[in-house]
């Protein structure tokens, strides 16, 4: 237990320097204003201190975090291929909503993870999709094929099977495969947390935790949707 | 102390100078253009929306503000600069601001110039904070939180140095907190809610919500990550309740782990929105086929209907030129009915996997209710027995990604749940993001049952570089109306009226441009809560913003004055307080303003009542009493003919209370 107080000299100066601004005169009017905060002395230093701290914190990542991000980009990218099929494969409206949400969420998370790697000076995998074929350029490309596949990822044969399905059969296959796919992502998060030094860095912890809760929530939803279709 | 005092000094001074009044439109400090002139009676939102296209900047972003006045903006103290600011709690004149690096306490007695009275470095995400009496509670969830508050993190996967759970401090001396206890939990504490039970003066309770992974049993004995089917001691599918004896807070301990999700089987959607119902009726009217299933209606797409009708005609051997007959329609309808019947059979099987945790629980002890925002569900809980919360109802919604938090209206006839789609780190307010996604869902509560009414989403489209989604907020005590203020991360602060739950409407806002140029930078408002006349916002990167409401056509000066008569000794927004308005002329005039707005009283009557009130106010003693009593009596007879009788009766009660 340690206690550190910033109170003391600094606060004393704050009070005695008389720099506390007077309250703005109340303007008894409703108003819309679009104003710029005036540039103030010391702001550049404050901004520099902000980024210095943030960049220092960002350097607390480990190789386990880098591997997680790199792998998850490819993992997420495959979900995009699956989601893109929904509008053209006779999916039910309910499933199309789900697919649209998955597409929206995972695209954004891929960008976040690429950015995470970029600002830490790590190689960034780029995603290329042609039909049902996923190509990862840069690091992590090998993890999407054959023996190196990440948990829950579909084989090319399974992707093609999904691509060939239509209507209720597409719904059923999509849900089955996406539940497995999402469960794989949850496993990847659990593995990261079970690694010494993994997810210590705040951004990595937040990203991994968000992926875990979002996908676990979606897995439960997909189970319910699948159960409703189980006798089809 | 590790920090260089010179840097600290620069930080404080810089923070101080940033509180210059940028908020007085037209004032000398306002460098930017003012989009529209002041209009006290404006009842339309500004157009074009000034929040669109704001210039980026970390501490110098362009700002837009409407029907609010910003009293101050202050950057965090140096040790916290660049580290995420999180949730807020309040006690007396103090605001307690969580930060991933510890806790900052601000003295708000001069809200135009808040001062840091204490900053306590003790890293742990998310540092969700609550206060009660001399106690302060802080959540730790991240893997780097240490029992000794050290800043070096914990690298090992299993470590006896790690804190994940609740830290308890004695803050009798606010400038010198004493760290008195920890309660470690299996999933840490993402958030927590403090329950002050009106029937229990000896204890308070902490409901712990932990959404992260389960700790290994080697680190915290008894933690089990297997599912409850495999091990009844599973840390999944439950919340934790900590009892804190006020006489011995160091003896705080988990007293129960209620499994409030057991057998949770709720429909994946709420009842239909008014717009959906309207669309269905219109479809019926134009002769479309409508399927009813599971409380919802679905309109058969025209093309599919044509196909089915065509098949029905072929089945009876009709020629190509023949018209569709009533019999064809009946055949299609029968086919649809059979389909629905078969679906109904298929869905009536056993329980499905439910949520394993809540994200946040809002406790409303005066009503004996709590709103649990729990992964894919919104739960209504009976908390009359604090250690054994009981689920009353669960709702789900296919538009909701992740149920995040709940806010009741004051009489608990409505509850609003937020959807933190994307976890708060993603841009979900772009122009093409649906207004039902990442929004608030509003429900009425009747006989302890929730019914969906409508959605609210901050309406200004944000850039792809601004993380934006529904987040924390609180009710503002405007009497007779349901008005709340809410954070939308980089979407800013939005104040809205949800008195009509089907048509919530924004009435004030503040927004900044993106925190970084050309990429998503850190920032946005995490929480904004009403506390004793102020709207206090915790800005993730920029620090602490303090606002107050300004009058407009949406909200009168009297309504704002009445809200300021409500004084709280402390506030933890997830332990919702029941607002009580003391008798005042402001309260009476607020109701009169509302009756004028709703045409619940005629213009002549409103004028007469206002004149009578002025007369009563300038009188004193028995003369005032007599004037008010006479006014109450005359108003009582207005109720019958008013289109807003309930409000007239509230006015009568307020006038009688003022008469004494």
Image: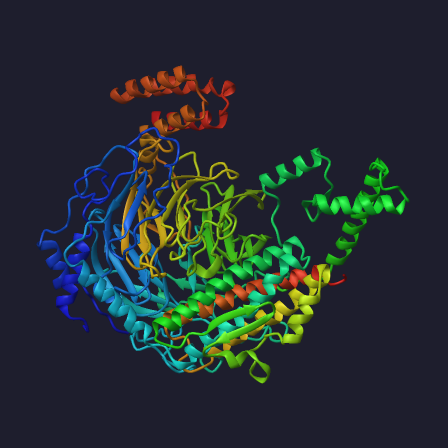
Residue at 41% x, 59% y is: B203
Q: Is residue B359 left or right of residue B90?
A: right
Asked whether B202 or B157 is in front, the reply is: B157
Question: Considering only vertical position in the picture, is B315 above or below B179?
Answer: above
* Number of disc labels: 0
Residue at 67% x, 57% y is: A91
Residue B659 location, quadrant? top left
Check the image and name the residue furthest to the bottom.
Answer: A147
Question: Considering only vertical position in the picture, is B155 above or below B457?
Answer: below
Asked whether B640 or B30 is in front, the reply is: B30
Residue at 38% x, 45% y is: B494
Q: Is residue B6 left or right of residue A102?
A: left
Tell me where residue B136 appears, x and y as whole percent: 33, 61
Q: Is residue B170 visible?
A: yes
In the rendered image, the quadrant that contains the C terminus of chain B is top left
Residue at 62% x, 68% y is: A179
Tell me where residue A11 appears, x and y as whole percent: 15, 59
Asked whether B389 or B638 is in front, the reply is: B638
Question: Considering only vertical position in the picture, is A81 above or below B523?
Answer: below
Tell me where residue B426 appears, x and y as whole percent: 43, 59
In the rendered image, the quadrant that contains the N terminus of chain B is bottom left
Q: Is residue B175 visible?
A: no
Q: Is residue B47 left or right of residue B403?
A: left
Q: How is the image coloured?
A: rainbow
Check the image and name the residue furthest to the right.
Answer: B317
Residue A232 location, quadrant? bottom right
Asked whether B342 or A163 is in front, the reply is: A163
Tell me where residue B374 appears, x and y as whole percent: 52, 59
């Amino acid at each position: 237990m340690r206690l550190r107080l910033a109170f003391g000299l600094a606060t004393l100066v704050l009070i005695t320097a008389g720099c506390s601004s007077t309250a703005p005169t109340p303007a008894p009017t409703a108003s819309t204003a679009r104003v710029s905060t005036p540039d103030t002395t010391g702001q550049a230093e404050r901004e520099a201190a902000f980024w210095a701290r943030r960049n220092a914190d960002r350097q607390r990542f480990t190789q386990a975090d880098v591997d997680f991000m790199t792998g998850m980009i490819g993992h997420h990218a495959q979900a995009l291929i699956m989601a893109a099929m929904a509008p053209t494969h006779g999916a039910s409206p309910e499933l199309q909503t789900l697919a649209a949400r998955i597409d929206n969420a995972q695209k954004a998370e891929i960008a976040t993870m690429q950015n995470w790697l970029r600002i830490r000076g790590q190689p960034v995998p780029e995603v290329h999709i042609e039909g049902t074929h996923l190509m990862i350029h840069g690091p992590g490309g090998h993890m999407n094929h054959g023996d190196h596949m990440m948990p829950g990822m579909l084989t090319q044969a399974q992707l093609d099977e999904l691509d060939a399905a239509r209507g209720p059969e597409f719904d059923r296959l999509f849900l089955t495969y996406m539940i497995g796919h999402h469960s794989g992502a949850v496993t990847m998060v659990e593995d990261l947390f079970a690694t010494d030094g993994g997810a210590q860095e705040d951004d990595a912890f937040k990203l991994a935790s968000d992926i875990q809760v979002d996908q676990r929530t979606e897995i439960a939803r997909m189970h319910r949707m699948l159960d409703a279709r189980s006798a089809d | 102390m590790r920090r260089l005092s010179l840097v600290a000094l620069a930080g404080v001074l810089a923070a101080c100078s940033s509180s210059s009044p940028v908020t007085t439109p037209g004032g000398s400090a306002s460098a930017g253009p003012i989009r529209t002139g002041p209009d006290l009676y404006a009842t339309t939102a500004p157009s074009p929306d000034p929040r669109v296209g704001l210039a980026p900047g970390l501490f110098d972003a362009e700002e837009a503000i409407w029907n609010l006045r910003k009293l101050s903006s202050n950057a965090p103290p140096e040790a916290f600069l660049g580290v995420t600011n999180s949730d807020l709690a309040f006690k007396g004149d103090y605001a307690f601001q969580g930060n991933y690096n510890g806790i900052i306490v601000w003295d708000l007695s001069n809200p135009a110039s808040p001062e840091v009275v204490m900053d306590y470095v003790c890293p742990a995400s998310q540092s969700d904070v609550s206060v009660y009496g001399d106690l302060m509670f802080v959540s730790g969830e991240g893997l780097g939180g240490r029992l000794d508050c050290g800043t070096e993190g914990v690298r090992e996967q299993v470590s006896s140095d790690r804190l994940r759970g609740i830290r308890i401090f004695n803050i009798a001396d606010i400038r010198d907190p004493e760290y008195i206890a920890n309660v470690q939990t299996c999933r840490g504490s993402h958030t927590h809610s403090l329950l002050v039970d009106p029937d229990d003066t000896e204890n308070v309770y902490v409901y712990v919500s932990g959404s992260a992974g389960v700790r290994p049993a080697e680190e915290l004995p008894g933690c089990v990550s297997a599912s409850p089917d495999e091990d009844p001691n599973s840390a999944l599918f439950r919340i934790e309740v900590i009892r804190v004896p006020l006489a011995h807070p160091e003896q705080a301990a988990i007293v129960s782990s209620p499994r409030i999700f057991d057998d949770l089987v709720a429909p994946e959607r709420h009842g239909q929105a008014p717009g959906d119902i309207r669309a269905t009726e219109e479809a019926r009217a134009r002769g479309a086929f409508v399927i009813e299933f599971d409380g919802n209606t679905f309109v058969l797409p025209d093309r599919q209907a044509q196909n089915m009708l065509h098949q029905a005609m072929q089945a009876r051997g009709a020629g190509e030129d023949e018209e569709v007959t009533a019999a064809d329609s009946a055949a299609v309808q029968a086919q649809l009915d059979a389909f629905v019947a078969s679906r109904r059979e298929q869905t009536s099987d056993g329980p499905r996997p439910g949520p394993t945790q809540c994200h946040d629980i809002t406790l409303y002890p005066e009503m004996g209710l709590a709103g649990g925002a729990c992964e894919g569900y919104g739960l209504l809980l009976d908390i009359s027995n604090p250690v054994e919360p009981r689920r009353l109802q669960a709702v789900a919604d296919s538009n909701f990604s992740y149920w995040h938090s709940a806010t009741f209206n004051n009489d608990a006839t409505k509850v609003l749940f937020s959807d933190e789609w994307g976890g708060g780190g993603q841009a979900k307010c772009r122009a093409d993001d649906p207004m039902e996604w990442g929004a608030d869902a509003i429900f009425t509560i009747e006989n302890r049952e929730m019914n969906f009414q409508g959605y609210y989403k901050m309406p200004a489209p944000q850039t792809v570089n601004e993380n934006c989604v529904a987040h924390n907020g609180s009710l503002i005590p405007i009497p007779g109306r349901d008005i709340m203020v809410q954070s939308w991360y980089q979407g800013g602060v939005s104040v809205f009226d949800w008195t009509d739950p089907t048509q919530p409407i924004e009435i004030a806002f503040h927004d900044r441009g993106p925190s970084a140029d050309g990429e998503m930078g850190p920032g946005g408002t995490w929480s904004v809560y009403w506390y004793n006349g102020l709207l206090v916002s915790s800005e993730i990167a920029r620090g602490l913003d303090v606002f107050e409401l300004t009058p407009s056509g949406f909200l009168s000066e009297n309504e704002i004055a009445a809200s300021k008569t409500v004084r709280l000794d402390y506030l933890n927004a997830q332990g919702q307080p029941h607002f009580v308005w003391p008798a005042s002329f402001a309260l009476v005039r607020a109701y009169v303003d509302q009756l004028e707005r709703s045409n619940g009283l005629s213009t002549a009557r409103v004028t007469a009542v206002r004149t009578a009130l002025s007369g009563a106010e300038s009188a004193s003693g028995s003369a005032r009493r007599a004037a008010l009593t006479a006014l109450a009596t005359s108003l009582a007879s207005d109720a019958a003919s008013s289109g807003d009788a309930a409000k007239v009766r509230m006015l009568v009660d307020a006038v009688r209370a003022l008469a004494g």
